[in-house]
Amino acid sequence: INGSFELENGENSKLTFGQVISTMMACPDMTLENQILQAINSVKSFGVTDEGNIELYNESGTPVLLLKKSNDISE
């Protein structure tokens, strides 16, 4: 998955992604990837949780993705 983003700092941290692209190489089931791409395309803002994770929110403020930091590359 690859694409651009635009970040606007302020009271409500605004974040939007430009055209997000992906390859279909070696992907026997595109269901999860399609869900992630759909979520990314709906992102309008973000926030940091008490645990230090990043939540990405849609226009109505509903979380659509949760990004967790991992020190283990296999997670």
Image (cartoon, rainbow, N blue to C red):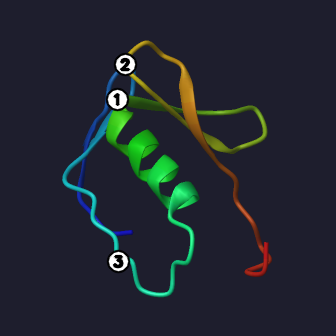
**Residue to which mark 1 is pinned:** 44
Give the residue at x 50% y 48%. 35
**Residue to which mark 2 is pinned:** 59
Return the x and y of residue 46 as percentages of the image width and height.
47, 33
- Marks 2 and 1 close (CB-CB < 8 Å): yes
Relative to 9, is 25 above or below? below
Q: Is residue 61 left or right of residue 18?
A: right
C-alpha span from label 2 to label 1: 5 Å
- Nearer to us in this view, 67 or 33: 33
Query: Badge 2 local density, few (<14 within 10 Å), some, or many (20+)?
Result: few
Identify the mark at residue 73; answer none if there is no mark. none
Say which of marks 1 and 3 sits in front: 3
Residue that lies at the very extreme toward the front in this rendered image: 28
Q: Earlier in the sequence, mark 1 or mark 3?
A: 3
Mark 1: secondary structure: loop
Residue that lies at the very extreme toward the bottom in this rendered image: 26
Relative to 4, is 73 above or below? below
Give the residue at x 68% y 44%. 53
**Residue to which mark 3 is pinned:** 23
Q: Is residue 50 left or right of residue 67?
A: right
Return the x and y of residue 60 as percentages of the image width and height.
43, 12
Q: Amino acid under label 2?
A: Glu
Give the residue at x 69% y 33%. 49
